[in-house]
Image (cartoon, helix red, strand yellow):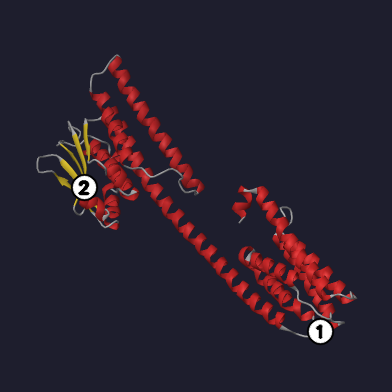
């Protein structure tokens, strides 16, 4: 309701006016229908009801807590005066009772714990006592007692659901922060390994003139991309906010391979037709991560690779991804640049958690191969396999 009110301010204002009009109409109707000969007790009932009804209408500058305390205090004071002194001849308590139930719902649902624990019972008691101002207890007393219990229980359920939603959101954000930490490792490994390889190539190769300028330009570009990625992810980790950009998918795999081919060996990429529209987002994101880690490992462990082959196709038991290179000798990297070996291990855990599998080892035709099979929906697996 709060979000709807912010999005539609005019409709929200009209709704507030309508609520106040309905409650005041009920008070007026009750006073005219029952108090044909106005007395002091009836005047007290009407005055109390009008104050409570006005407190039930939301105001931007008046907090719910203030309105609820005012309504509960006025209603209980009026009930105490009428019950202990001169009763009204006949009381329904329609407008005042509904207003108290509206405030009770808001307090139990949204107020802080201590406020709800104290103010909620006060509003419930005021609602139950409103029809007891009558000189004779009747049906309305039972009705308001039942309504108070039902509204309180329903509001507590809503409060519990909101608390559970907040706990779930906190758990999701915590998992997201861990995932971003893994992404930060992958991005740094991918970009920095490329920088180290290019720097060593420039160091041990006789480069001068335009060729040297081009090599340093590629190093500068890779370094800038690495810094931008780190700043973006570290900022999200520091703020604790979830990402609002879509997950990387098969389209990003194409962009990744094109970027990699500019500073590394050529990449031959094949993706079965129709997979872009049929592969689930989480599977496509996992494919992107595996390809990125595999290409990073090619830089580290296959310095003499002349080509990289990437195939993504649907098979009967899911989506198959193969990343193979023809390299035989690893790059000469310093120990600090080799990484901790968590890349493929983490991706293997991710694949197994999704119900798939991931293997890495020597390819039959030479070189190294990473193969992953991730589960898909039945329609995708049968249609493309």
Assign a secondary structure to mark 1. loop
Q: Residue at x 72, y 67 (%)?
A: 99
Assign a secondary structure to mark 2. helix
Q: Residue at x 69, y 66 (%)?
A: 103
Residue 329 placement: quadrant: top left
Can residue 66 be seen in this snapshot? no
Looking at the image, is 162 positioned above or below residue 34?
A: above
Residue 271 placement: quadrant: top left
Q: Position of residue 291 (x, y in %)?
A: 27, 42
Quadrant placement of the N terminus: bottom right
Can residue 316 be seen in this snapshot? yes
Q: In the shown orientation, is residue 67 left or right of residue 43?
A: left
State how far apart marks 1 and 2 are (Cα): 80 Å
Q: Position of residue 218 (x, y in %)?
A: 33, 25
Local crowd at mark 2 within 10 Å, few (<14), some, or many (≥20)?
A: some
State how many labels appear: 2
Local crowd at mark 1 within 10 Å, few (<14), some, or many (≥20)?
A: some
Q: Residue furthest toward the top?
A: 209
Q: Quickly name the residue at label 1.
A: 135
Q: Residue at x 25, y 42 (%)?
A: 294
Q: In the shown orientation, is residue 240 left or right of residue 20?
A: left
Camera-side residue of 366 and 302: 366
Q: Quickly name the residue at label 2.
A: 384
Q: Position of residue 289 (x, y in %)?
A: 31, 44
């Amino acid at each position: 309701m709060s979000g709807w009110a912010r999005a539609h301010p005019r409709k929200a204002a009209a709704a507030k006016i309508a609520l106040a009009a309905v409650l005041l109409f009920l008070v007026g109707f009750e006073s005219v229908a029952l108090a044909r000969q106005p007395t002091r007790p009836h005047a007290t009932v009407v005055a109390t009801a009008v104050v409570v009804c006005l407190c039930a209408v939301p105001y931007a500058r008046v907090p719910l807590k203030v309105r609820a305390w005012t309504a509960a205090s006025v209603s209980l004071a009026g009930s105490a005066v009428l019950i202990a002194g001169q009763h009204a001849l006949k009381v329904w308590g329609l407008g005042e009772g509904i207003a108290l139930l509206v405030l009770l719902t808001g307090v139990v649902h949204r107020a802080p714990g201590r406020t709800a624990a104290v103010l909620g019972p006060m509003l419930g008691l005021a609602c139950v006592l409103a029809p007891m101002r009558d000189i004779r207890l009747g049906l309305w007393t039972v009705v308001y007692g039942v309504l108070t219990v039902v509204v309180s229980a329903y509001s507590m359920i809503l409060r519990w659901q909101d608390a559970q939603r907040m706990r779930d959101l906190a758990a999701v954000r915590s998992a997201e922060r861990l995932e971003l930490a893994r992404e930060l490792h992958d991005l740094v490994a991918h970009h920095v390994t490329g920088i180290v390889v290019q720097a060593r190539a420039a160091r041990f190769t006789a480069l001068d003139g335009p060729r040297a300028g081009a090599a340093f330009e590629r190093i500068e570009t890779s370094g800038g991309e690495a810094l931008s990625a780190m700043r973006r992810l570290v900022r999200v980790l520091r703020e604790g906010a979830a990402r609002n950009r879509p997950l990387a998918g098969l389209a990003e795999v194409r962009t990744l391979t094109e970027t990699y081919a500019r500073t590394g060996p050529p990449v031959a990429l094949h993706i079965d037709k129709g997979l872009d529209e049929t592969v689930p987002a989480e599977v496509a994101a996992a494919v992107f991560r595996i390809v990125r880690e595999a290409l990073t490992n090619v830089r580290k462990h296959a310095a003499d690779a002349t080509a990289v082959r990437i195939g993504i196709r649907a098979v009967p038991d899911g989506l198959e991804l193969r990343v193979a290179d023809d390299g035989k000798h690893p790059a000469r990297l310093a120990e600090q640049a080799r990484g901790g070996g968590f890349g493929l291990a983490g991706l293997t855990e991710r694949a197994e958690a999704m119900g798939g599998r991931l293997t890495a080892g020597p390819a039959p035709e030479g070189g190294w191969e990473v193969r992953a099979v991730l589960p898909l929906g039945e329609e995708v697996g049968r249609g493309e396999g």
